[in-house]
Image (spheres, rainbow, N blue to C red):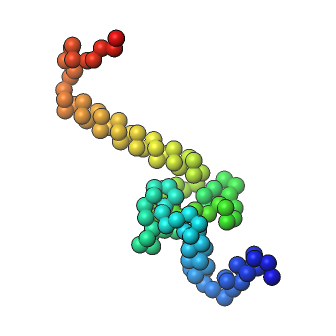
């Protein structure tokens, strides 16, 4: 019996939720108990397996296409690829920084002439 059949034998007679738990445990063992996208710890059991490249984008339910993720990232990522989702998150962070900068400038009031540093 090859290794693949040995793995499949583990799933015989198990309920789907048990199969998912075994797969999640193996993915967490490989990747660590952190969400692959936001880094939140899954020590409290808040992780699930994500199909990194979604089926709608050509992804397959293959070992190399599985990542641990938290429920929030799984829901938000949707049909995006991992790169698209990371860029989406990055843009959101930039938007928050820009908004904080605008609020700060509003609190400070208009710039006074002569206070702006001049480049040589
Ligand atoms: Zn996450």
User: For this rendering, which residue is in front, 20 or 39?
Assistant: 39
Q: Splitting the image into 4 quarters, where does residue 54 fall? A: bottom right
Residue found at x 40% / y 44%:
93
Residue found at x 59% / y 66%:
30
Q: Splitting the image into 4 quarters, where does residue 27 fall? A: bottom right
Residue found at x 56% / y 46%:
84
Residue found at x 39% / y 39%:
95
Q: Position of residue 52 (x, y in %)?
A: 60, 58
Quadrant of the rendering where the C terminus is positioned = top left
On the rendered structure, is 110 left or right of 118?
Answer: left
Q: Would you place residue 86 above or below residue 109 in this image?
A: below
Q: Position of residue 85 (x, y in %)?
A: 53, 49
Quadrant of the rendering where the N terminus is positioned = bottom right
User: For this rendering, which residue is in front, 75 or 3?
Assistant: 3
User: For this rendering, which residue is in front, 83 or 54?
Assistant: 83
Residue at far bottom of view: 13
On the rendered structure, is 98 left or right of 63?
Answer: left
Q: Would you place residue 71 above or below residue 57 in this image?
A: below
Q: Position of residue 57 (x, y in %)?
A: 66, 53
């Amino acid at each position: 019996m090859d290794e693949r059949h040995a793995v499949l034998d583990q799933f015989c007679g198990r309920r789907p939720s048990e199969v998912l738990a075994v797969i999640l445990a193996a993915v967490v063992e490989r990747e660590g108990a952190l969400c692959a996208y936001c880094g939140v710890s899954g020590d409290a059991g808040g992780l699930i397996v994500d199909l990194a490249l979604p089926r709608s984008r050509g992804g397959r339910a293959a070992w190399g296409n599985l990542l641990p993720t938290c429920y929030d990232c799984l829901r938000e990522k949707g049909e995006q690829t991992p790169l698209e989702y990371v860029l989406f998150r990055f843009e959101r962070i930039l938007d928050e920084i820009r908004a904080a900068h605008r609020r700060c400038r509003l609190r400070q009031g208009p710039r006074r002439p002569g206070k702006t540093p001049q480049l040589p």
